[in-house]
Image (spheres, grey):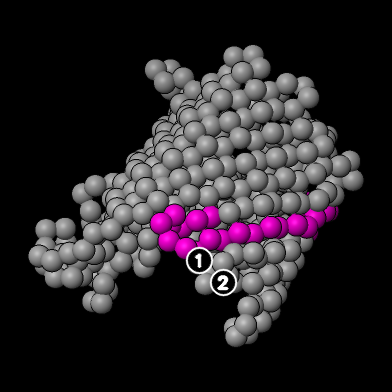
Amino acid sequence: MSVTALLLAAALSQTPPPQPGAASDAPPAPPAADAPTTPSAVAAPVVAKPAAAPASKGPTFWGFIDAQWSATDAPKPANDSSTFELRRARLGARGEVTPNVGYNVLFDGADTSLKDAYASLKAMPFLPGVELRFGQWKTPFGYEQPESDTKLLWVYSSYVVQALARSTSTTSLYATPDSRDLGAGLVGKWTAGALGAELAGSYVNGAGPNRKDDLDTKNVWGRAGVLLKTDGGSLRAGASYGHGRQVAALGANGKFDGVGSPADDTYFWFKTYGADAELDLPFLFVAAEWIKSERDVTTYTSATASTHSSFNARGWYVGAYGKSRWNVGPIFRAERFDRNRSTTNDLNERYTVGGYVDLLPVSARLIFNYEFDRSDAPVRTGDRAIVFGQVIF
């Protein structure tokens, strides 16, 4: 199908976005695919939920475009910088092959990469409330990690989530920029009156999106939580866990040398724990998260010689934004991340302030963030001003 035809099909298949103040009686769906959340769903006095997908076998197309300007006041002797960029240009399709078999695909034209791509089994009588997935999606851990990019009002991920709640890269002990991975998993949701329970788990490669992994051990990520929902708002809380073994660096030759006789690769084992809580009121939303990770590192200097080390990393953030009948509100986040508690001068500390306005009924949003960087000098990157625009279709 040509790009023109695809976009035309997307335009014809859209349903009107929920209007401010609209609300759904159903509890919010568990964090899953990066499906868009209309701006009014954030700023409305009662958070509106996306309409349920029709029971049609045909695909529903959707997407969003994010453009950004940022300016960084870098610490000396580094130079200040200013840039325009297209952060995201995503087009997705979701639908059902049968009432029990669904699919979700999301592609980003800004970095020409596949994001979500999975098939799902759902509405199974022997597993009520459970959806099984096979493919690639955001791994479950805490609140911020699996949340849709169309809903977060602080533009950049928190330090601790970015570093500890995701699969690792092949160049460092910390995480990939993208929170997705390949594997199998489940998402479960159950309700009984005002109370609800959530469960999500993923068994994945651990190498990040669009990458295979040669290790015979895989990574496990999961979150279990509870939800209390009333007419006046909702309270959600959960605990998360991650465990796995991964290649952190490929060495000078830049390739995986094998588990049996590694030449210069670096491996690490990790256990990551987290707790999160979210309070959603008609005039305010607050999210808080704490994460700790224990890591053991083995660096091979030859096929038979290696060095070992271990360290603990931890951090937290608290973020909030206000809501109003005018679809505008303030934004705030405070965060700290200590990448190794046994060393000094490596603490990241940042404070984000700003505001947002939703432009209805065109489903567009304008966000301003100003980040005050109060990190230790060796890891400080500088204060940053950000203007971020988003259009959902």
Q: What residue is rendered at 65% in x and 41% in y? A: 287
State the image quarter where residue 388 is shown: bottom right
How busy is the neighbourhood of tag 1: few (under 14 within 10 Å), some, or many (20 plus)? some
Which amino acid, mark 2?
Ala
Which amino acid, mark 1?
Asn
Q: Is residue 80 visible?
A: yes
Where does residue 102 sit, x and y in percent of width and height? 47, 37
Q: What's the distance in space between the residues labelled 1 and 2, CA to CA?
A: 7 Å
Front one among 360 and 44:
44
Q: Is residue 116 left or right of residue 301?
A: right
State the image quarter where residue 210 is shown: bottom left
Q: Which mark is residue 345?
A: 1
Q: Which residues are magenta?
A: 337-366
Front one among 97 and 186:
186
Where does residue 318 sit, x and y in percent of width and height? 65, 46
Residue lying farthest top? 193
Q: In this figure, which residue is indicated by the disc labeled 2?
A: 377
Q: Earlier in the sequence, mark 1 or mark 2?
A: 1
Front one among 314 and 31:
314
Q: What residue is rendered at 75% in x and 35% in y? A: 47
User: Do the numbered discs 1 and 2 sit on residues whose CB atoms are within 8 Å?
Assistant: yes
Residue 270 lies within the magenta run: no
Q: Is residue 367 visible?
A: no
Note whether 194 is above or below 83 in the view shown.
above
Q: What residue is rendered at 73% in x and 39% in y? A: 285
Front one among 111 and 201:
201
**Could you tell me which secondary element the residue under label 2 belongs to?**
helix
Q: Is residue 331 left or right of residue 34?
A: right
Residue 339 lies within the magenta run: yes
